[in-house]
Image (spheres, rainbow, N blue to C red):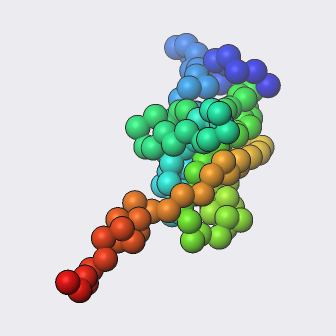
Amino acid sequence: MSTLPTEFERTDIGEIQIAPEVIEVIAGLATVEVQGVAGMSGGFAGGIAELLGRKNLSKGVKVEVGQREAAVDVSVIVEYGNRLPEVASEIQRNVKRSIETMTGLNVVEVNVHIHDVIFKTTERVEELEPAHRVK
């Protein structure tokens, strides 16, 4: 497998190539669609996972693309309160389904790396601002 654009299909009028960056974006979109995913993780910087959110979808995704197959690694941050194995399994299913449907490539593996667990922003605000305060 290589990380360079590969020949995917030859037709009578030319070649079709799918760049690895395209597959990274597809995998990133499929990942953040899963309930419980807070965002993509860019890895560890000083021991703290960098939350990339939904704007930088190809970050936190690594792909290896061959002629007919692809392998994907995604690094994520999960919202607190979700069962990690269930979120990871759903990411695997969604990424595999999305890439195979959109590109025709066979996804041989989807590795999920959970780098952090965070609280939802709305829950944190509610904790900081009690609804009823006695004066």
Q: Quadrant of residue 40?
A: top right
Q: Is residue 49 visible?
A: yes
Residue at image x 70%, y 21%?
3
Q: Is residue 97 visible?
A: no
Viewer-closest of 115 and 33? 115
Residue at image x 49%, y 39%?
52
Q: Is residue 82 above or below residue 101?
A: below
Residue furthest to the front in view is 135
Residue furthest to the top in view is 14
Coordinates of residue 88 in the picture (x, y in percent): 67, 58
Coordinates of residue 117 in the picture (x, y in percent): 60, 57
Viewer-closest of 131 and 57? 131
49 relative to 68 in the view: left or right: left
134 relative to 34 in the view: left or right: left
Residue at image x 63%, y 52%?
116
Q: Quadrant of residue 9?
A: top right
Q: Is residue 9 above or below residue 125?
A: above
